[in-house]
Amino acid sequence: MLDALTLATGVAALLLAVWCGWAAYRDQPTKDWHFIGMAVVTLLTLVQLVVGVVQLARGEEPEQGTVIFVAYLLGSFACVPAAGFMSLAERTRWGSVTVAASGVVLAVLEVRLYDIWKG
């Protein structure tokens, strides 16, 4: 895995969490700008998914197993979009809380992905 990409994705996820957490603190639902931020984070996870699959296809293997690595890649890719859809259903501050929580979860998933790949 690319360490810089993993770090960038984790930092972007935490920034999204802080931004949406601030919106929740101000009693605001997710706005269009938040969805642009979610799209950026999702794009980073998509790039990470592609890089991970390409590295697996080239014969490189994660230290802790391929199946768990792929499962974490897919989970990290689905984390923020799933929260985005839930925030559309909940157009109150709790939608912002959901997206903020997904940003924290994604950052933890990134740390775990790094750990799975490096051992």
Image (cartoon, rainbow, N blue to C red):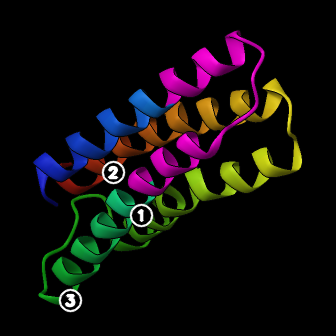
Is residue 50 shown left or right of residue 67? Answer: left
Using the image, determine if residue 104 lies above or below residue 32. Answer: above
Along the line of sight, the residue nearer the viewer: 91 or 43 = 91
Q: Earlier in the sequence, mark 1 or mark 3?
A: 3
Q: Is residue 47 visible in the rendered structure shown here?
A: yes
Q: Which residue is mark 2?
A: 113
Residue 40 belongs to the span the image colors magenta: yes
**Magenta residues (range):** 17-41
Residue that extends furthest to the front in the rendered view of this protein: 32
Q: Identify which amino acid the numbered label 1 is placed on.
A: Leu
Residue 104 location, x and y as percent?
A: 51, 30
Q: Identify which amino acid the numbered label 3 is placed on.
A: Ala
Q: Earlier in the sequence, mark 2 or mark 1?
A: 1
Can you tell which mark lies on residue 29? none
Residue 91 location, x and y as percent?
A: 85, 39
Element type where label 3 sits in the image = helix
- The CA distance from mark 1 to mark 3 is 15 Å
